[in-house]
Image (cartoon, rainbow, N blue to C red):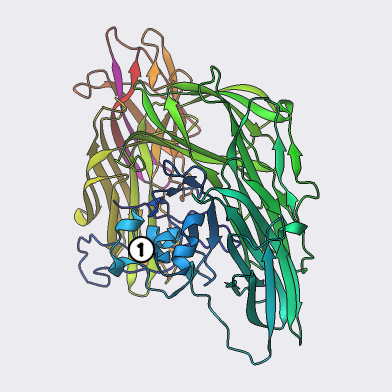
Amino acid sequence: MRTRQTIAAVAAVSAVAASGIAAISIANAGEDDPQPVETGWAASQTQDGTVILPTGDRVTVSPDGTTGLQRAEGREDVHFLAFTSPDGSGDSIVVPSDRVEAIRSGAEDPRRYNISQLLRDGHTDAAAVPESELDTREYDGLAPAAQRSEAKADTQPVTVTIADSAGEVPDGNFVGWFNTITGEEDFFSFDANGVGTADLPAGEYLIFGEVWNETGDAEAIEIVMGATNVTVTDAPVETAFKGTDASLISTEVEQPDAVDSGALVAVGFAGATEADDAGSGIMDFPGANTETYVLPEPEMPASTELEFVYHPSFSSPEGAENPYRYNLSFDELGGIPDDLAFSVTDAELAVEETTYNSFGIDLSGNTCDVGTLRGSVNGGWCTVLPVQLPSVITNYRTADPEIEWGGMADFGTFDEEGFMLLEGFTETYSGQVLEPGEAAVSKGHGPFGAGAPDMIVAGSAEGAATTAFLAPATSYNGETVNLVGYEGTATLSLDGTELGRFDGSDTYPVVDAALTEAGRYTLASETTRGADTVALGTANIQSWSFDLDPSALADGEELYPALPVAALNTEGVDGGYADAAAALDVTLSLVSGPSAEPTTAEAMAFEVSYDDGETWNEVPLDLGGGTAAATLEHPEGAEYVSTRMTATDDAGTEVSHTTIRSFGLK
């Protein structure tokens, strides 16, 4: 399955969260006549998609960078290390604690846990990737080998002794060093006595990471994490990373029967200014009832700022009549809180009675929500939780003007492992700021229309290339919900000559092409899907005609053409259905893809069909200021409303899209 590649920054557990297109590899570039191509450009360093680890656990990166962890069945108590590769690539690596020693011993391949590289190469099942297609870099332990500046003769041994909260040698460890000036980092190897040594040149260093104790089935019973500082001059250095110096994290919530559902804890550090982006850190996902300790705040050099991330979660007891969930964020930029015993009352939180709609068919799926402190470079990770549709759950979430919430969800039919969504719908959101107090929230509205393509054009010395991602059916009605499970075709043409084509089925149709000259381009698609999970958006026809001059792009320059759609907004549709007997007021406005600038409609037309597109009725529009308003009166006996929109924007782009069964009537 093709994974979607975008410029959205992946949520890395380091200050080094690289984004943008790293390299371009073009097929047929530079030829006089444009030719259809089916190979794309090399992936950027940040992709979205899902990787199933060899352990069966799943890591999902959404288009906005939110990254979710879902434990495989029976592995609910295993904890996970998440960190950034020390080689400067910015790759995100996720390793279950019960695989750390197997990787270090050579019994297991660390390349199958590099989430960024696997997504770059289009792999979703890490265990199934042929060895010949795995990362070609040299690995040292869990990660690609760290890059070293020129060897220096004046190094000194830095010896670190590790210990758990009782002062004993811990069962497991992942502790490294970070040079706060050069940004270089690497990890220690410890002997049976918990002692490790590295030869380091003079400089200011942070010793960071975690140690842990666990039961025989890899259930963590204790984690100690954090950072301490050392200065290397002209003599050997001895220091300690000891749990006896650490404080226990705890959280108290108001509901007396709340059940610990685990947490996310990170200690990271980054340059104190935007110009200085060197940084690193460690993140862990402790299971329920794991005791997690954090070392006291170290003395930080002026060039580096510490960050603390703590996201505990709690839920109502299984089978509760009124289910609820706590999803909390206790984050701090610039240091570690003096008091790690947290407590919160329900009155301080956003208390949302959330209705999860099903679009008419009962489904199961997952949600993943996270509140991230503004300015954080270690946030954006969440734990995937199951949800049944339809259902009502009360969500208690941190309400703070400095915390922005984002998340993702997927519902429908999954593969045999229960991880990969085959048919159904997905939802993503970001930038939501919550206020304290009670509120009623509804998720899954509809109606559906065309999704705005995300088209990326990149220049190189050999020419330009593009990849366009299409979303056949999307609801922009106070949400971004995409229907999944389509098959069909998509093409990109220049003045009638086809340059690239997609045929088949995938999460999103993707068209790759080499571009060589200016002209009038057309991106078009025709797709269909079944109605087993959602009886809406069953067939779609879309077309965009636009001017583009790719030859004007310099090497490494990127362009994101605005290919808008006419989005349908109304308060009268919820769960994909409207009242058949009531007049429905709607508005239409242009929406561009996530990477493109918005445009304004200069002309727009709207038609509806009540017989799945056999006949069409023009709807009068009141167009003003780029937005059009209309009222629909439904004929008696109608069950579904299909929609057809055409528009021309202020850039001269012409768009036409048809959605069969945009929404239903009851």
Q: Main secondary structure of the magenta part?
A: strand
* Left or right of residue 592: residue 247: right
Of the pair 647 and 242, the residue shown nearer to us: 242
Q: Which residue is mark 1?
A: 550
Q: Quadrant of the C terminus?
A: top left
Magenta span of residues: 639-656
- What kind of element bears circle 1? helix
Image coords of residue 317 (percent x, y): 56, 25
Q: Amino acid at mark 1?
A: Pro
Q: Is residue 559 above or below residue 139?
A: above
Q: Is residue 204 above or below residue 611?
A: below
Of the pair 98 and 185, the residue shown nearer to us: 98
Badge 1: few (under 14), some or many (20 or more) residues near its Cα, within 10 Å?
A: many
- Is 650 within the magenta? yes
Does the rendering let one see residue 96?
Answer: no
Image coords of residue 542 (percent x, y): 28, 39
Of the pair 48 and 106, the residue shown nearer to us: 106
